[in-house]
Image (spheres, rainbow, N blue to C red):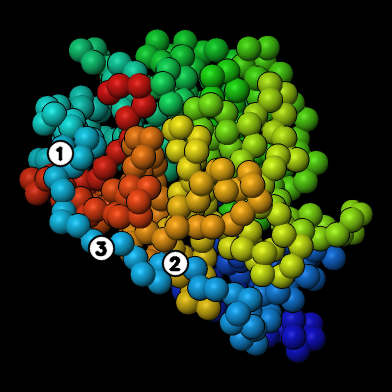
Amino acid sequence: MNDLEQRLSESLVRRAQTVLEPVFTADDVVHAGRSAVVRRRVLAASGALAAVVAAVLLATNVLGGDERALPPVGPTSPPSSVAPTPPSAAGLTVVGFNNGKTVTIQPNGTRSTLDLPPDLTVLDVIGVSGGWLVHARAAGDQSHGLWIVPEGADTVHVVDLEGNYEVSADGRTLAAVVVGGEVVAYELPSLQERRRIRRFNGQPFVVGIADDLVLLREPSSDGAPTKAAVWNLANNLMGPPTENNVNVWSLGSGGQAPVAIVTDPATGGQMRGCLSVATLRPDALPENAPGFCATDESGILTVLRVRRAAISPGGDQLAVESYDERRERSAVQMVTVADLNAGRWQPRPTNAPPDNRVLFWDSRDTFVTASRGPDDFGAPYYRCGTNGACTPLTLPTDLTEARVVPVYGGG
């Protein structure tokens, strides 16, 4: 390893030590790089691309770079903060613990205690059509699984998990990576199995569900882009994987998915980075959707900075987490799909605290963020509007480890 490579590796390791969270999932990693291992892996997969990316990062992060080419990520004049709002007044649902029981509080103030087996450690709860879906781990066991608590009925164990799971926006379809690596789709609340399929050489990652289409990708614990594909539940067929490695983070109810692609000049053509919103076809994730595409270092770095892009239910807005290499922190920004479609990168700042994570959209115009990972109960939560103003949420004080949770199709 030469001197420049050594300095780059040391810089990336230092960045990993400041950015790495105690809990993260496959798509919850800073794309710009967590360690030297990430860069070596990309270098092995794509020499020309990795060399250019490494040069960009070296110029901007190790050597300082041109400040004019690297506008800081995040607000310069953020919107004014507003007073904390009780979650029920904001139309949100809260889950927490009271005397060892899992308690849900709906926006209208209605409380209910989930009838769960006593040996479960609850990891996550979401509202679904006809009840609650609980992600939990059995006592003394590292395995984890899903339980459903129907309204007015007994709790049912759904399946043990090997990977992640997602629920459709209407709360009626669950797709889960089960033990053995298969992806299984269930109807909710009946739990009737619809389809199952095996994807890729290893364990897949479920990005989202829109009608009968399930978007899958290869997992990436280090944030590197991977292949993605569409699973059509109507005919149980899997489309071909994307030609390029992509980062795709979310899926709207209308089948729109924000996609980032950095193409390698070694495969022909000029190196460029593109961030677009593609609408799923029944057999594929399009890779040529109109979007913001750049061939200069600043533009490519802008694409590489995007850590996560959560699309709104209406499919017209993105809540984006972008990573700032110089400040070594991420910021939440708003981007319109119309701007991307017109080839413009015009993010709007929010006043979400630095390093806040975008968790989920709770309406067409508002989304929820938290200051720690989504699996951490009790994190400070904020509700942000498309105007950039984020309101701190005051959680019920009688609940321990309380958290705001999404509700899909009722709950």
At x 78%, y 70%, the residue is 52
Q: Which mark is residue 328?
A: none
Q: Quadrant of residue 214?
A: top right
Residue at 24% from the left image edge and 53% from the top image edge? 391
Contact between labelled residues 1 and 3, with CB atoms less than 8 Å apart: no
Assign a secondary structure to mark 2.
loop
Who is closer to the viewer here, 310 or 225?
Answer: 310
Q: Residues within 10 Å of mark 2 (few under 14, many from 20)?
A: many
| Left-right relation of 366 to 3 | left
**Mark 3, secondary structure of its residue:** loop
Percent x, y for residue 263? Answer: 79, 54
Please, is residue 23 above or below residue 189 in the view?
A: below
> In front of the other: label 3 or label 1?
3
Q: Is residue 389 above or below residue 119?
A: below
Circle 1: is it few (<14), some (14-19), or many (20+) Cα within 10 Å? Answer: few
Left or right: where 388 falls relative to 325: left
Please tell me which residue is depicted at 63% across the width and 76% down the height of the picture.
Answer: 69
Mark drawn on residue 74: 2
Q: Which residue is mark 3?
A: 80
Say what secondary structure mark 1 lies in: helix
Of the numbered discs 3 and 1, the one sitting upstream in the chain is 3
Q: Earlier in the sequence, mark 2 or mark 3?
A: 2
Q: The disc labelled 2 sits on which kind of residue?
A: Gly
Q: Are marks 2 and 3 in contact (CB under 8 Å)?
A: no
Using the image, tell me which numbered label, if any, was put on residue 89: 1
